[in-house]
Amino acid sequence: MKIHEYQAKEILRRYGVPTPKSQMTREAAEVPKIAESLGGRCVVKAQIHAGGRGKGGGVKLAKDPAEAGELAEQILGMQLVTHQTGPEGQQVKTLLIEEALDIAHELYLAITLDRETGKPVMMASLQGGMDIEEVAAENPDAIIKQHFDPHLGLLPFQARAVADGLELKGGTSRQAQKLFAALAKAFLDTDASIAEINPLLITGEGDVLALDAKMNFDSNALFRHKDIVEMRDFDEENPLEVRASEYGLNYIKLDGNIACMVNGAGLAMGTMDIIKLYGGDPANFLDVGGSASQEAVKNAFQILVDDPAVKAVLINIFGGIARTDRIARGVVGAIEELGNVSLPVVVRLEGTNVEQGRQILADADFDFIVATDMDDAAKKAVDAAGGA
Amino acid sequence: MSIWVSNETRLLVQGITGNEGEFHAIGCRDYGTQVVAGVTPGKGGQEVQGVPVFDSVAEARAKTECNATMIFVPPPFAADAIMEAAAAGVELIVCITEGIPVNDMLKVKAFMRDFPGSRLVGPNCPGVITPGQAKIGIMPGHIHTPGSVGVVSRSGTLTYEAVWQLSNAGLGQSSCVGIGGDPVNGTNFIDVMTAFAADDDTEGVILIGEIGGSAEEDAARWIRDNYEKPVVGFIAGRTAPPGRRMGHAGAIVSGGEGGAEEKMATMRECGLHVVESPGEMGATMAKALGK
């Protein structure tokens, strides 16, 4: 689960990570007053979940409260396009107004899980503000890494090593070490999957602050973090994905026109891949769950046909524990219940009682395009959607 | 001609009094597995369809000599159930539960270092089956046939797909292991490959990976250096957009790592028979074995 910058800073402050003075608002009219209270000169920052907000024009410096008000008018409501939003962009509904500080250096700092070692790793770099992936690609040795024990946290010598790697001295180094330990504790306590401060700011006076903050959380651990669940912003999510999650379905909207309904995450990915292999484009990832009950199939189908980009539907179900004939009845029942489905529907059923399952599809009032295996199904779906 | 699970397996089911636990415990027994005990704390003394239920794994182990366990405990308590089984000395721990927090699994990994005699498979996996002998897990037993091809996979239904293709091509399976779709798990590809390599009757292996992490690359390099029999490889998720979790918690391309193309390229370089289409896993194995 993702949250906004202002929410991440709220959490980090609780753990003792210093941040610039700031205030969140959804009203442009309030901005001049907020700017005044922050000393006049300030930064107006669009709050959307995607990165790259600055380059997209969503983060601007105002020299006085009047200009802050004007910038707020411009940014609030705009469709902010960044390399992470897709071409349609994301509408800005919230702003963070932040005091403008004197910047001496910008560094990079983040913690994530290293899957290979099974340990959290703190990563830091002198090239703040840059995408860490670019730094990693161009100059991997420029990234300072410290793996730490998830139960002991970041130890003092490890914090010192990171500060030394960043060439920090004296009081600045001591402030930074405290911040590193605080970030590590916040990461572990909140079951975060990413905690990133980019840039980490060193001011002209040598103070260390989090100028930006990003946190993502392990969705499997949200049951023990009610406060974080409350930070979820549904405006930032695709409405079809929100609806699917209410039904307990695993759905991700993609750019293509062939909708897929599959049981199991791996088979669902494999189905998307095979569509692409035959020249088509999947409209979504959708895992209806291992049992593929009639209720799940119906809800899933409704979501698929509500996507206006969809030109054909491919249902690929491997009937294992759930028998294929029962799944076929579920698919037929769902389509009859929905009525007027006018899209071509390719069905590939395999597994237990497959002959009975195919017979049920053949006997239905709806004209299914029945496929014999995965390759056949993908070819038929690509044809039905208008060809490669 | 199998790994880890056989007709010698004496299975315990943790969480046997829940719907899923009961359903699949009986499913395993119907397939031929010796299901000797169940555990649900506070429900000791009951029976589930003739299977005695105990309060703790230690008690179940002492009274029934179970040597494997299948876990259906809900996510908030599943890590504890795994550690309880390890502490009681159970040799094979298969955790089916999906949705265990990563931090809980890090605890499990640290804890299990003190119990090298216990192997964890999963979590979030379909389990392990040795066709014709026994199964521990939720896979449909009847699509399998006894034989000599090993299958190891991060995904459930994609494993069934591979098994079905093999069975239809007249190729039976020695054992099939689902290692699970989570980023931190107990048994990895190399562990399973090592076991298949030690099993003379396994003549080839289908290895099914997913996007995310670098376990497939590590396995490919291990195979290049240690395994001479044919290995057919497939990676699901070529079309997955970066930064999105594709169902499985571990199936995510992030930080420029874990992409399908890179994994497939490494597998090819290491001599695996990489298939572009998941529809060709069985046929490719048949060809590689000259059948």
Image: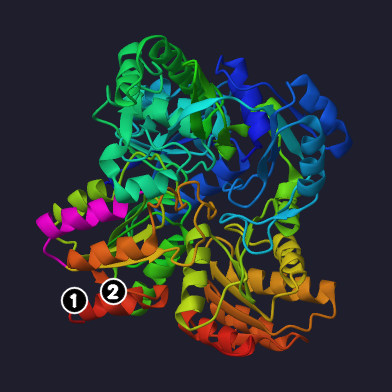
Residue name at image x 41 percent, y 21 percent: B59
Marking on residue B289: 1
- Mark 2 and mark 1 residues within 8 Å of each other at the beta carbon: yes
Q: SS of the residue at dot 1? A: loop
Front one among A312 and A142: A142
> From what the image shows, is residue B188 above or below residue A380?
above
Give the structural element (helix, strand or loop) at label 2.
loop
Few, some or many residues within 10 Å of mark 1 (<14, 14–19, 20+): some
Q: Which mark is residue A226?
A: none
Q: Which residues are magenta?
A: B213-229
Residue type for callout 1: Leu
Q: Going from the N terminus, do you reach mark 2 or mark 1 first?
A: 2
Q: Examine the structure image and report whether residue B34 is included in the region drawn in magenta.
A: no
Toward the front, the furthest residue is: A63
Question: Is residue A223 left or right of B203 when viewed as pictured?
Answer: right
Q: Main secondary structure of the magenta part?
A: helix
User: Badge 2 is on which residue?
Assistant: B171
Q: Nearer the viewer, residue A156 or A166?
A: A166
Q: Could you tell me which quadrant the N terminus of chain B lies in?
A: bottom left
Q: Relative to residue B271, is residue B20 depicted above or below?
A: above
Near-viewer residue (B33 or A119): A119
**Residue B204 point in image, percent of width and height:** 20, 66
Decide if residue A246 is on the left or right side of residue B38. Answer: right
Residue A377 against residue B123 in the figure, above or below: below
